[in-house]
Image: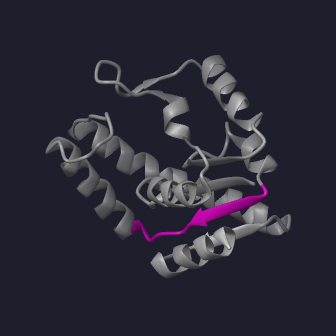
Amino acid sequence: MKLFIIGAAGSGKTTLAKRIGLNLGMEITNLDDLFWVNNGKNYGVKRPAPERDALLESVLARESWIIEGAYVEWPRQGIEEADIILYLDIGLRELRKRIIMRFIRRKLGKDRENKIGNLRSLTDLLAWNRKQIVKISACIGRLHAEGRNLRIVRNEKDAESFIAEIVG
């Protein structure tokens, strides 16, 4: 199975991908880990495009994969090759709340990820997310028009139903 999970920052992509991966015994690829150099010294530094693209190509070469992210342009090949595209459609107010709470957890050292940030990175993410939602919506509209195997998750009940369906 090739599953591409797409949604805005804060929509729950990583959490849902981990749940699915655990149930299916599959490795998860977070597009942020390919796009950014995420370590304490270089947080917020973009990986060079050729390196990022090569990393994505190595994931796509696998027989099966789960990829999750908020990007729709540069990982387009992954979207095109996916058997299932899972769209996490969460309201803007909830997205903002989740992003701010994640920022606070990271500042308090309660987040397991090795990602740091500052107030500027938080405000940049909130602004970027508003623009990215428009791009994601356009992509989802195109995929729907093409008749792709597109599933939409709006809440926990939808997520549970999807997991039950694919785990069997």
Q: Residue at x 70, y 60 (%)?
A: 85
Q: Nearer the viewer, residue 57 or 87?
A: 57
In the rendered image, residue 96 lying in the magenta stretch gets the answer no
Q: Position of residue 146 (x, y in %)?
A: 85, 64
In the rendered image, residue 89 lying in the magenta stretch gets the answer yes
Residue 159 to residue 105: above or below: below
Q: Position of residue 63 (x, y in %)?
A: 78, 42
Instruction: State the scheme by which the image is colored.
Output: one colour
Q: Residue at x 36, y 69 (%)?
A: 94
**Range of the magenta residues?**
83-92
Q: Which residue is the extreme one toward the left?
A: 108
Q: Is residue 167 left or right of residue 100?
A: right
Q: Is residue 113 left or right of residue 148?
A: left
Q: Quadrant of residue 93?
A: bottom left
Residue 32 to residue 87: above or below: above
Q: Nearer the viewer, residue 57 or 168?
A: 168
Residue 90 to residue 133: above or below: below
Q: Residue at x 38, y 28 (%)?
A: 44
In the rendered image, the quadrant that contains the N terminus is bottom right
Q: Quadrant of residue 101?
A: bottom left
